[in-house]
Amino acid sequence: MARRHRAALTAGSLLSTAALLPPAIGFADRRLSLHMLLQMLLLALVIPLLAYGVHPLIGGRLARLHPIAGIMALNVVLFGSQLPVVLDLTTKDLRLAEAAQAAFMAGAFLFWWPIVRPGGLTPIAKIGYLMVAGVPPTIPGITLALSHHLFYQAYRSIEDQQIAGLLLFGTAKFALVAGTFVILWRMLAPQPDPPDWEDHELEVPDLPPSAPAWLRRLDDELPEEAARPRVPIPAGR
């Protein structure tokens, strides 16, 4: 495993574990905007680090994951976690809140996997993947940001609800712009020059065992010509 993968795996694992601890969940449940901020940090920063760091270890096990499945997983956990019934229940039960947080992280991981997995989508396909995935989250984000009606019983502040909507809307656009920038930067980065084969001697492979005997004798040295007197050839008449 490369050093960058090890560093990303360590940071992603520590931050993911911290997000599942009761202090982090209890602090985020104080306000809807804090709850949304924690989820968006997981979606846009923590889970991409975790997915990038862990892909050398489980690269082949999720190779068959279709990109559409990743988009669907993200939208299911994102829309499901914003439902008033779900959010009101998670504020009352800590175990349910931890389970909902773990489900959200799993869906975000499946979403980022086609991006970080090597040998999967082409760079242009990755940009299109991010563009398609960035559209659905804008719907609940705009709804929360522009609505003057309270949707949640646990949070009774219009201003806080609007800030949460702006965080959701802004994070979707930030993930699209940042991901596109990283992909374009890697596309345009100069690639290392290929080795100059003229500076190295090519090794000729040995002949296969089934080669005929006369072919092997071509590599033998020719016998020295026996010394004998040269007879001049008379010129023709």
Image (spheres, rainbow, N blue to C red):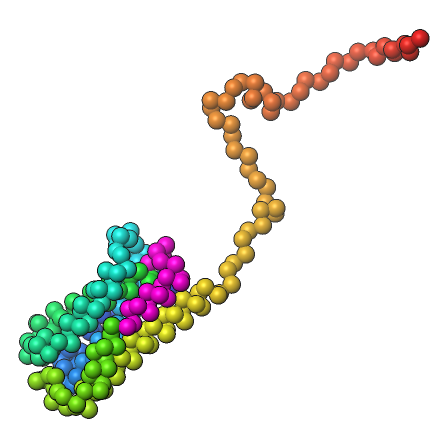
State whether residue 33 is above or below residue 119. below
State whether residue 29 is above or below residue 95. below
Quadrant assignment for the N terminus: bottom left
Tell me the residue at 17%/78% (across/down).
Answer: 24
Camera-nearest residue between 232 and 166: 166
Q: Quadrant of residue 161?
A: bottom left
Camera-nearest residue between 136 and 193: 136
Q: Quadrant of residue 234?
A: top right
Camera-nearest residue between 2 and 155: 155
Q: Is residue 96 visible?
A: yes
Quadrant assignment for the C terminus: top right
Query: Is 190 inside the magenta-drawn segment?
Result: no
Q: Is residue 9 visible?
A: no
Camera-nearest residue between 145 and 190: 145
In the rendered image, residue 131, in percent from the top left (x then y), is placed at: 33, 69
State whether residue 11 is above or below residue 55. below
In the rendered image, residue 14, in percent from the top left (x then y), is placed at: 24, 70
Tell me the residue at 32%/65% (across/down).
Answer: 129
Instruction: Point out the stretch of residues depicted in magenta.
Output: 117-135
In the rendered image, residue 29, in percent from the top left (x then y), is placed at: 14, 82
State whether residue 120 is above or below residue 43. above
Total numbered badges shown on the rendered structure = 0
Tell me the residue at 24%/82% (across/down).
Answer: 142
Q: Is residue 222 left or right of residue 70?
A: right
Q: Quadrant of residue 118?
A: bottom left
Tell me the residue at 15%/73% (across/down).
Answer: 81
